[in-house]
Image (cartoon, rainbow, N blue to C red):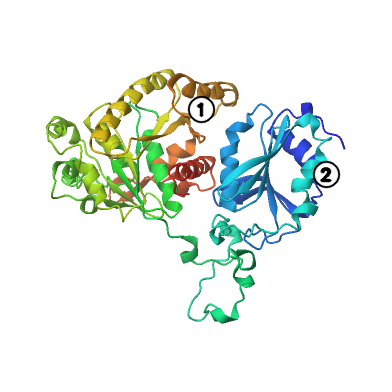
Amino acid sequence: MTFNPNNCRNESEVESKLIVSYLLPKLGYTPDTWHQEVTFGNIRLDFLSFGTQVIPLVLDADSPMSVIIEAKHPKENLDRHVRRLKRYLTSLSIRYGLITNAKEIRIYQRAASEIQLVFKCAGQDVETRIDEIRGLIGRDNLKYIKILPNLPLKEHQNNLVTPELISTVPLEKNNPAPAEPEPSQISEREKTPENNPVNIQVKSDAILTQKKQNTMKIIAVYHNKGGVGKTTTVVNLAAALSKKGNRVLVIDLDSQANTTFATGLVKFEDEEQDDLKDNNILQVLQSEDFFSIEEVARKSNFCHPEIDVIPSHIDLMQYETELNQLDYSRMILIQKLAEVQDKYDIVLIDTPPSLNFYARVALIAADYLIIPSDLKPFANQGLINVKEFIKKVNGFKKQISKKPLEVLGVLPCKISTNAKFVQYSLPKRREAIPKRYGIEIMDSVIYERDDLAKCAEQIQIVGNMEIADPISVLDFKPDSIASQEFEMLALEVLEKIGKN
């Protein structure tokens, strides 16, 4: 069979005409050795092919070598998808990844935590170069390749498989783990990673939650333009990070208290029943000696696992001038967060959409910054103010010997799902950000979806009262596209802050 890239008009045709009908058969893969639309936890692959038949579908150090194949729309620039492919290869410990939009074909190889381009050709040349592709990722070649022996064992461990593929039988007293052999009984050859595979079909919670290096990372989420999805980003990103085993603290520094509402901490219907008034972020900032983070933080069942939240309150408005006049006011949050650096892995700070004192406190305390934006004209123009604000904050950080704020990028948020907009307008708007404003744009995109609105509108009836009971989109509808978008955002953030 021959292949003509001009016959592929969309992503579906790239999959059917190039990958299924041409590439997989040419590379020797039979239907029982490749799988389409494969899910491993929060990772969804277009195609995953194996050197030999694999049933059940399991990835571990003893699995046959495999290759990820990703299809993109013919008009898509493949450069935009390399970071995501790297995430797939390194997270799943897979050696090769092929990515194509029909007009171009690339093959990347994983080397530890990095990937490198090992093959590239135009789609129209694929027939003349198919032997080169077969030499890299053909089924006959992969059958005999072992996992790289110099990779540490943790590279082979994978806790991203779908629940359907994992046996959840716990190790109990009446079902003890098999006794381990004495060290003298294990040969040096048996101690190597390739001969000591980690089987992920049976896992205990201890294996699923790997111990992380105890370095707390503080991320502010800020834009001086309101209505760009800042609170939605904070709370659902917190949920996604928590589900990856991180201990998460959310701090609401906006007097509108949207994050406090969104995480379900407002359990009263009348201000006379307000139990937040005297125990919120305001008291944390007012007192040097009292109201520690641990005292004020509240558990939120907005998501599972739970997160901790420092609530905000409308009273912040009337105390801003007073706090701004205190000598220690800008430093107090840094000091109090230092006291809990062993308790949390990640702190997310929601900020007011302004250039005020509370926004400054948040950015001074933060190590990193995410700038949510709907990429519309006023939000874009606001980036000029954001850049100037960051410059002033970094000037203060230098005086107190604190590292400058690292901008993770502009996060496209509340983006329309209109097909024509996504295909034609969105790419242009994304390209404009780094060109005009010199700020990197993040790979992740958060679209405006019904599920995001519905999960925030959940309620519970307590007696005669109707109480807001919001839930994260990842708990409300785990398989939704919105949920996947926040999972991918969490992966991108973890990679950028060095916690992947």
Q: Sort mark 1 into few (<14), some (14-19) or many (20+) by Cα contacts within 10 Å.
A: some
- On residue 26, the disc is 2
Q: Secondary structure at mark 2?
A: helix
In the picture, residue 427 is in which quadrant? top right
Q: CA distance from mark 1 to mark 2?
A: 40 Å
Give the answer, above or below, for where 40 lies relative to 382. Answer: below
Residue sitting at x 30%, y 31%: 394
Quarter of the figure with the N terminus:
top right
Question: Counting residues from the N terminus, which is met first, the one under dot 1 or under dot 2?
Answer: 2
Residue at the extreme right:
1
* Residue 307 at x, y percent in the picture: 35, 51
Q: Which circle, 1 or 2, is nearer the viewer?
A: 2
- On residue 416, the disc is 1
Of the residues shown, which amino acid type is indicated by label 2?
A: Lys
Give the answer, above or below, for where 286 lies relative to 191. Answer: above
- On residue 248, the disc is none
Is residue 293 rendered to the left or right of residue 229? left
Marks 1 and 2 close (CB-CB < 8 Å): no
Closest to the observer, 492 or 33: 492
Give the answer, above or below, for where 436 lies relative to 307. Answer: above
Would residue 406 be visible to someone looking at this image?
A: yes
Of the residues shown, which amino acid type is indicated by label 1?
A: Ser
Would residue 270 be visible to someone looking at this image?
A: no
* Residue 72 at x, y percent in the picture: 66, 34
Give the answer, above or below, for where 288 lies relative to 316. Answer: below
Closest to the observer, 204 or 112: 112
Is residue 487 rendered to the left or right of residue 118? left
Residue sitting at x 46%, y 60%: 210
Is residue 188 rendered to the left or right of residue 474? right
